[in-house]
Amino acid sequence: MGIPVGIEVRDEIDPAAIDRAFDHLRRVDATFSPYRTHSAINGGELTPEADAVLDRCAELSARTGGWFDVRATGRLDPSAFVKGWALDGAAAILAESGARNLCLHAGGAGTHQGGDQQLLHRLHPLQWGMRGIVSTRAHAAAPQSLRRHCSA
């Protein structure tokens, strides 16, 4: 995606789950980026997952009367759908590891689960673009909070 991505989890989980979530986001970027020369979208081999995403984009185009268009820029670019879809997939990975209170954000898109609405508003702009920043701190709502920002 080439954009800053942040993950915050307010539950005790294995930190490796956050690594798996970022691995998922990197894989999605490698598959769907219109800016990567060898991505599936740029003439690489389309996987069943890529076919399913493009089918979903076609459904959205039909439902919106063409207002949603993966070729609006003159080339295939499903980024408008893929960013949110990728974050949902990363959230599912974290949920499988026991995360119930979490926030993921990437370039203006985000997903939030749990009761702490403040997660949506507490970002660290000085950390944008920096790779692998991790901090652990105590929080009244949960025994551990993991926050990590990187460019996915």
Image (spheres, rainbow, N blue to C red):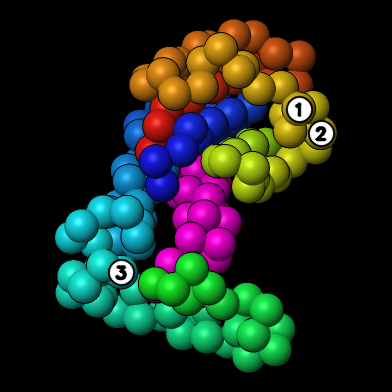
Q: Residue 92 lies in magenta, yes or no?
A: yes
Disc ID at residue 76 = none
Which tag, 1 or 3, sits closer to the chain's start? Answer: 3
Q: Secondary structure at mark 2?
A: helix
In the displayed structure image, the side of residue 128 where residue 145 appears, left or right? right
Which tag, 2 or 3, sits closer to the chain's start? Answer: 3
> Which residue position holds label 2?
117
Q: Secondary structure at mark 1?
A: loop
Amino acid at circle 2: Gln
Which segment did they paint magenta? 76-98
Which of the two marks, 2 or 1, is nearer to us in this view?
A: 1
> Which residue position holds label 1?
121
Which residue is outermost to the top?
Answer: 137
Disc ID at residue 41 = 3
Q: Position of residue 98 (x, y in %)?
A: 54, 41
Residue under the point 63% across and 76% down: 68
In the displayed structure image, the side of residue 119 where residue 13 appears, left or right? left
Q: Main secondary structure of the magenta part?
A: helix
